[in-house]
Image: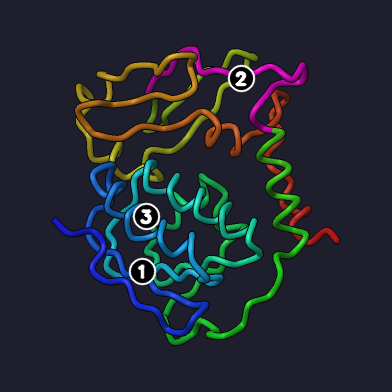
Amino acid sequence: MKYVSSVQTLDPRTAVVTCQGEMSILAVEELRQAVDPLLDGSISHLIFDLAEVKYTGSRVLEVLESTYERMRRKRGKVSLVGANSLVRSGLEIFKLDLVVDLYDQIEEVPIGVHPRPIKAKKAWSANVRKAQGDQKGERVRATSLRFADNILRVFMSDGREIGVPLNRVDWLAKATPSQRARWFMEPGGLAVYWEELGDGIEVRHLLAIQPWADGRSLPLEEEGSK
């Protein structure tokens, strides 16, 4: 299965990466090979055409996240086109919907416009970095998990419990109960992985849903801060 169907350069600063299929962990290496040369070059606006993508696993979302961070450092931007509801759910879990531009059609994307990153995106980045540790500056780890009422509940070392509805994690929703039960904690409790399913969830992305141990969610009102 080819997950990146084409890479097209529209102008010296704009490129389109067209993806397709069910982009699980198997798509990661191919996606990196397509994106890395663009990030190392003169491209400052990277467009991902996801109209033919059925869903994106957590490892692929991590590639999109690192792509955004690298593009932000070079004062560029990332746009996503045609993401379906399952893909958008993954973007919301990773908080990427707050920092990338989303479009329904490729024709809607402004070409040749390369604005500097807005301060709201810097505020998002600071909040996600804050979510990596607890109030003492220590790394928060996952200690255990369970499935209940179609919700994945992950227990953290600082006492919080973070719940993610299975309908927002397509590859887990499609798995059987016995497959979901065969998980293991990566060293240090920084990620949970399902080897049979070929995918996993990093703790840092769970913490982005609920960055503070008292139950507060990410303050979306900061999105408009100056």
134 above or below 7?
A: above
Q: Is residue 12 left or right of residue 3?
A: right
Q: Characterize the magenta stretch by its predominant secondary structure.
A: loop
Please report the residue visible at 43 percent of the width from the left and 38 percent of the height from the top.
165
For label 3, count other residues whose C-alpha is less than 10 Å away and answer few (under 14), some (14-19) or many (20+). some
Q: Circle 3 sits in a helix, a strand or a loop, which is it?
A: helix
Instruction: Say which mark, if any, is on residue 86.
Output: 3
Q: Residue 11: x percent and y percent?
A: 47, 84
Instruction: State the quadrant of the C terminus.
Output: bottom right
Q: Quadrant of residue 97?
A: bottom right
For label 1, count other residues whose C-alpha is less than 10 Å away and answer few (under 14), some (14-19) or many (20+). many
The segment highlighted magenta reads 131-147
Q: CA distance from mark 1 to mark 2?
A: 35 Å
Give the residue at mark 2. Answer: 140
Q: Is residue 188 left or right of residue 48?
A: right
Colour scheme:
rainbow
Residue type at mark 2?
Answer: Val
Give the residue at mark 1. Answer: 17
Q: Residue 19: x percent and y percent?
A: 29, 64
Q: Quadrant of residue 2?
A: bottom left
- Which residue is nearer to you in this view: 42 or 54? 42
Please report the residue visible at 56 percent of the width from the left and 70 percent of the height from the top.
44
Q: Residue 202: x percent and y percent?
A: 46, 31
Q: CA distance from mark 3 to mark 2?
A: 28 Å
Mark 3 or mark 2: whose residue is earlier in sequence: 3
- Tag in front: 3 or 1: 1
